Amino acid sequence: MAQNKMFNNLLVLVIAILFGWLLFALHIMLPWMFGPILASIFVVKVLKRDVQWPLWLSELGLIMLGVQIGTSFTRSVTSDIKDDWLAIVLVSVLILLLALVVSIGFRKIAHVNRETAILSVIPGALSQMIVMAEENKKADILVVSLTQTSRVIFVVLLVPLISFFFKTDHSNRVTEANVQYLTDVLTIQHIVIIALGIAVVYILMKWIHFPTKMLMAPIVVLVIWNFVTNLTFTLDAPIIAGAQIIYMIRVGIQIAHLTDQLKGRIAVAIAYQNVMLIFGALAMVYLVQFINHASIDELFLGAAPGGMSQIVLVALDIGADVAMISSYHIFRIFFILFLIAPLVSVYLKCLEHNNKNDFN
């Protein structure tokens, strides 16, 4: 059994590398993102293999992506981001208002109650919404879980296509000339210090149940590192490709299993809400551009619903401002965690209380 498990994992890894290399050779967008996804679906659906990809490997990939995000937050970049605070706040508020509007249609199509609809459509807070669905007696935990987790399918398909369609030439952007690859800048001692720092912050975040700690822990450590040492660097291309492979294999396996569950009215409702959120975000950034002169593709990636890890991979591939785009998603995490989630929780409790009074 253990041998079969290891063989299946090695099989999907080898095929993921081959698919990624093939897409890279054909100059297909995001080869190291789509390659592992296609490989995982092929192994699970076509070869009928039971792949149990190790959680620690996918988390390691996320941590490396978090390091890459953190390296982009240099002193000068952070100073520039401060000028965009109004757009960052506005985008977070508008995308959540859009989600509430979309929840009305989702509720009617899926034939679910208001509690289930609201918890299903709010983007960027999977764990918080599922926890609240478990606590709320009227919410359908299965619908909420399926809707939130299936968003990854639409994010990895639609967001890259839209971003490439509106792709702007970022080659003229002024960058810091002294930023070099990790292998050219850091010593073994430096790498050990960064790794220990990430481990400590990760443990602290895990202790306080902070969301997306695999990304946030390395971001926090690398921001501090950049400010304290001024030894700025970027990850070597093979490291970024490796991180994408070991993380996106898990995403591909998840997609392969989710496709079996997306059936009937719920499937239509899920497709509706994700398409509306993604294209609604695109329409929204056209308005935001009046107060922010960033390019459409960067604003869209900052506003797009979905996991920060997948969005950042698209940003890296098109040469967009990773730090600026990450700032939108990081702010949204805190915004949802400390304001929206508590407000939704209070609202759902009020609904439950009113329903009890009406029943009595």
Image (cartoon, rainbow, N blue to C red):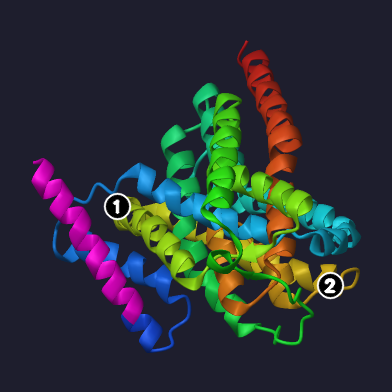
With 341 as the anchor, is 196 left or right in this view?
Answer: left
Q: Main secondary structure of the magenta part?
A: helix
Q: Is residue 301 above or below residue 99?
A: below
Question: Which residue position holds label 1?
Answer: 257
Circles 1 and 2 in contact, beta carbons < 8 Å:
no
Which portion, as a residue range, is magenta? 1-21
Is residue 96 among the parts visible in the rendering?
Answer: no
Quadrant where the image shows the N terminus: top left
Q: Is residue 138 above or below residue 295?
A: above
Under mark 1, the amino acid is: His
| Residue 85 occupies quadrant | bottom right
With 184 as the anchor, is 152 left or right in this view?
Answer: left
**Residue 11 in magenta?**
yes
Residue lying farthest to the top in this orientation: 360
| Residue 264 occupies quadrant | bottom left
Query: At which x and y percent is residue 172?
Result: 76, 87
